[in-house]
Image (cartoon, rainbow, N blue to C red):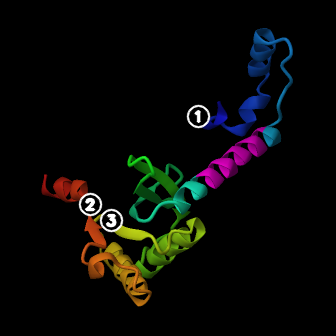
Amino acid sequence: MVLIHEYPFMHMEHEMFNIFMKTVSPHWQKISRTTSKMDCVAVYENEKRRLMALLKNVNRISITTDLWKSGQDIQYMVVTGHFINSDWKLQKRILNFVDVPPPHSGVAIADALYKCFLEWGIENKVATVTVDNASYNDAAVRNLKDNFALKNKLMFGGKIFHVRCTAHIINLIV
């Protein structure tokens, strides 16, 4: 419930919630915010292990990434992986949210992306990177492409490595 509805951990300690739960289930035991947090972290770690096991069997993965600002003015980069599973079904998974404080530079973005690739064990499996038209993204992809070229890990000599986001281009045209 906390994960799905994004409730704060302290929701478990609210008096009316606990009265409601005790009414619904007489065996209900109050859960502390610490227990709620630990349970959520355990679910996250379990799902991460499952995804890492799934990614071990993937030959190529395409990455999309975008920067956005939260309601608290914290700037994040989301990294999403797209791949075909063993049943030949397209899969999409969020791999990381990275705090990327301004000013944004190609080096900082490339570094954050590469760290994400290393963390997930996909640094040798990246086929394409799709980004919007921001100049720092051009520099970031150029840095990544140079890095992958040194390891000879680019498909088609890197001609398809950098993909510009079509939705962003259409939005600019409109």
* Residue 165, disc: 2
What amino acid is at disc 2?
Cys
Q: Residue at horizontal 59%, vertical 68%?
A: 119
What amino acid type is highlighted by mark number 3? Answer: Val
- Residue 19 in the image, given as x and y percentages of width and height: 79, 15
- Crowd around label 3: few <14 · some 14–19 · many ≥20 (10 Å): many
Give the camera-side residue of 45 and 68: 45
Residue 10 in the image: state x and y as whole percent.
74, 36
Q: Which residues are magenta?
A: 36-50
Disc on the earlier residue, 2 or 1: 1
Q: Which mark, by number, is residue 131? A: 3
Q: CA distance from mark 3 to mark 1?
A: 28 Å
Specify whether residue 130 is painted magenta. no
Res 30 → quadrant: top right
Between 173 and 64, the one nearer to me in the picture:
64
- Taking the spot 42% from the left edge, 78% from the top edge, the residue there is 105
How far from the left and from the top, in percent, is residue 112? 51, 72
* Residue 59 sits above or below residue 72 on the image: below
Residue to which mark 1 is pinned? 4
Tag 3 secondary structure: strand
Quarter the N terminus occupies: top right
Residue at position x 41%, y 82% in the image: 148
Secondary structure type for disc 2: loop
- Foreground residue among 145 and 36: 145
Do the residues under discs 3 and 2 have CB atoms within 8 angstroms?
yes
* Amino acid identity at mark 1: Ile
For marks 3 and 2 on the same chain, the one whose residue lies earlier in the sequence:
3
Q: Is residue 163 above or below residue 156?
A: above
